[in-house]
Amino acid sequence: MVKLWNARTSPKFRFSAKFPRVITHEKKFRNCEKELEMFYNAMEPLKNKLLTLLIQFPPYLKIKEGLEALRQYDFFFDETYRYAIEIRHPSWFSDLAYNFFKNNNICLVWNQLDIIQTPPVVTSDFAYIRLIGDRSIHERDFGSIQRDRIQEMAKWADKLKEIQKYERNVKMGMVAANNHYAGFGPSTSNAFREMLGLNPVEWGIDKDLPTKVEVEEVRDHKKRPVKQTSLSDFIPK
């Protein structure tokens, strides 16, 4: 599947991949070395198109529980990727978390959720905004804008403009919107682009891109020659 994503997108297309739920929610960052290695191995074909790997914390995971889980769990950062962390419990909104993210150039994802909004604190050399709806818009209505989110989006657009003007270390900005946010993610993304003075994107499949690719034999994930660092090294004991 990942090879197909790579083959069916243009060389300029970029992705953000999220760590599997089995790692972040089911195993809660414990005893999942095999799953991590498999995930990194699966992402290899997209490596040149990946802007970041997203670690999404469960909404019930508080900062104390989260840091303790990370401390006990042999999580490894592959240094060749950028990382972003999505936190959905307000206990994380503290200098302890912000400083940890800053010290390791990990992006604090800015969430616009109906139940919570992440403070727009810059913690890395890139910014990542996720506009996520609460699933109150039915899937049958997807394909057109169903809810006016312009005022919310304008605030985030102004924040990105502010960063562009004053934060010299920030090199990139990313914005993702799902269909549940306003009704149609692509239209939401184009509206946001226009707020930033960018041209809208035409959506569709390039006919020159292949629809299927040859599937290669999966390599032994244990042989991936990448230097890794234990996350526990960065967390105060």
Image: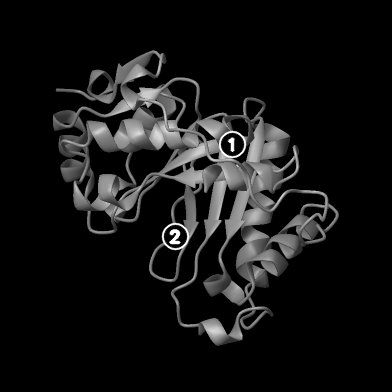
Question: Is 31 positioned to the left or the right of 79 in the image?
Answer: left
Q: Nearer the viewer, mark 2 or mark 1?
A: 1
Residue 47 appears at what percent x and percent y? 56, 31
| Mark identifier at residue 117 | 2
- Dot 1 falls on a residue whose secondary structure is strand
- Rendered residue at 34%/55% (across/down): 88
* Whether residue 76 is situated above or below residue 11 in the rendered picture: above
Amino acid at pointer 1 = Leu
Place of residue 192 in the rendered image (x, y in percent of width and height, measured from the top left): 71, 60
Q: Amino acid at mark 2?
A: Gln
User: On the rendered image, what quadrant is the C terminus found in?
Assistant: top left
In the displayed structure, 211 sits above or below 228; it is below
Q: Nearer the viewer, residue 37 or 215?
A: 215
Q: Secondary structure at mark 2?
A: loop
Where is residue 143 shown, x and y percent of the image? Answer: 67, 78
Residue at position x 29%, y 58% in the image: 59
Which residue is found at the position 27% from the left and 49% from the top? 22
**Residue 123 seen in this snapshot:** no
From the viewer's perspective, is residue 76 above or below residue 117? Answer: above
Q: Earlier in the sequence, mark 2 or mark 1?
A: 1
**Which of the 4 image quadrants contains residue 154?**
bottom right
Residue 191 visible here: yes
Count of picture labels: 2
Marks 2/1: CA–CA distance? 23 Å
Q: Residues within 10 Å of mark 1 (few under 14, many from 20)?
A: some
Give the residue at x 22% y 40%.
29
Name the residue that disc number 1 marks: 51
Q: Residues within 10 Å of mark 2 (few under 14, many from 20)?
A: some
Check contact, mark 2 vs mark 1: CB within 8 A: no
Q: Nearer the viewer, residue 205 or 19?
A: 205
